[in-house]
Image (tube, grey):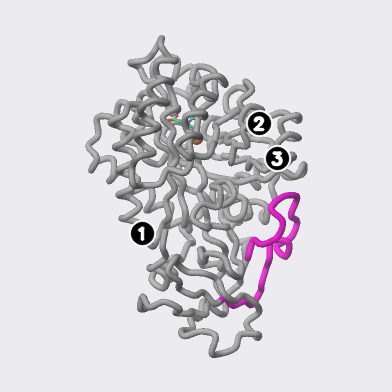
Amino acid sequence: MLQSTTHQRVLLHNARIITASGPDRGPLQTWDQLGWLANGALIAEQTREGWRTVWLGPVGDVQRPRYDTAVDLGGRLLTPGWIDSHTHAVFAGDRSHEFAQRLTGSSYAEIAAAGGGIVHTVAATRAASQQDLLTQSAARLTEMAAWGVRVVEIKTGYGLDLTTELKTLAVIDALRRQFAGRLTLLATAMPAHAIPREFQGDPDGYVALVCEEILPALARLSVPVPFCDVFVEQGYFSVAQADRIWRAAQKLGMRLKAHVDELSAMGGLQWALAQDAVSVEHLLRTDAAGVAMLAQSQTVAVCLPLTSLFLRESFAPMRSLVDAGARVALATDCNPGSAMTTNLPLAMQIAVLMAGLTPPEALRAVTRTAALAVGEAGGLTGRLAVGERFEATLLDVEHPDALFYELGAPPRGNSRLLDTLFSQNVP
Ligand code: NIG
Ligand code: FE
């Protein structure tokens, strides 16, 4: 392990590098368009804020004494660190019985209407001790890290009361410490995930609780909460309610994310774009007019192909979104009801096989555009570029095509080497 002195410079060489420093919109046909270096090298420097890339180029151009330590990557693939930009990874219990019900014909909406769905997980999460919630959630993050993921956004939203939303955030904070140097965690406040049972019949009462108590309490904690997310959906939150919640969150310095067009298109997309949301998520029901609006905006379209697969629903119009010029990110949506999975590479594979993205577009969608989907929080850019934060995924493959070929393959991440080298990375 390296000493934690400042200005330590490490050369990574004999690497195949994808920089992801090309355009963040529009179609990509080739790996060259995503910044491909067949025999590359990179020098990272440790600073007080963490590691930065200070040099990047073909191996033949590297000169001493620009580095202190050299590490041979053995021809492996180095990409910007993979970002899972949309997860609900902190929850207790499971809903495998609902999965079985859906396989015999019940829909997600029918199960929720019958008293299952999110509120089922809320009951389990409320009942779980903080330690138990931590243990169950840590297992999921361990899997994510094994897939090569380096950054995970995690939403609250299985508490839906002050105590349990605070417990969820305390767990995220504990996970941040437990995974320091392996994963960067970004917290999103999502008490507006569902109406809890005790407020059935009084949704506006719950919205008031969210605005007046839950969000302010979450914002007061020492763990940063850069985003607020709202599930805009029939039976969950209307546009008017989402707007009230967003006004409160904005005053607390949070940025807007929104679940829209997942089960129905009810104006959430248009509302979120008018608020300059940092991202809109799901988009299964987004039509051509919505695609055109997204293409004109800075807002990132976070697509979740494993949710479509898991729910046996259609896919978000990913191909049209990219062709129209929208920024498209891919994430797992890891949650017990609509996407019980941690497998980000599988999300990339399904986006390619079922929704028409090209492999370079899918890799961009978990690097550069995923960084935009989390507002480039903490200086995260999703690129390997000189002067920017160094955050990378190292893979045991020689060519990025291999990432798509072996469907649902066992972990190919080899980030342990990077963890050891760069364990002082500041989250
Ligand atoms: O992203 N849309 C809302 N939330 C999740 C589902 C959560 C659950 O069913 O537990 C989603 O699909
Ligand atoms: Fe979600």
Q: Which residue is mark 3?
A: 297
How far apart are the two marked residues, 1 and 3, measured between alpha carbons?
34 Å
Query: Which is more toward the observer, 220 or 164?
Result: 220
Residue at the outermost bottom position: 64
Depth check, mark 2 against mark 1: the one in front is 2
Is the CB atom of the residue marked by disc 3 within 8 angstroms of ligand 2's nearest atom? no
Q: Which residue is mark 2?
A: 274
Question: Do residues under tags 2 and 1 come within 8 Å of each other at their CB atoms?
Answer: no
Vertical relation: 138 (above or below) 47: above
Residue 112 horizontal side relative to residue 125, left or right: right
Query: Which is more toward the observer, 1 or 199?
Result: 199
Asked if residue 33 is among those painted magenta in the image, a careful observer would answer yes
List x then y, in percent, for residue 291.
72, 34
Which residue does the image show at 22% across and 37% down from the upper left? 129
Vertical relation: 153 (above or below) 291: below
Mark linked to residue 364: none
User: What amino acid is at disc 3?
Assistant: Ser
Q: Which residue is mark 1?
A: 180
Q: Please rate how many residues cluster around mark 2, counting C-alpha atoms within 10 Å: few if below 14, some from 14 to 19, many from 20.
A: few
> Which callout, 2 or 1, points at the residue further toward the start of the chain?
1
Asked which secondary structure carries label 1, the reply is loop
List x then y, in percent, for residue 336.
41, 34
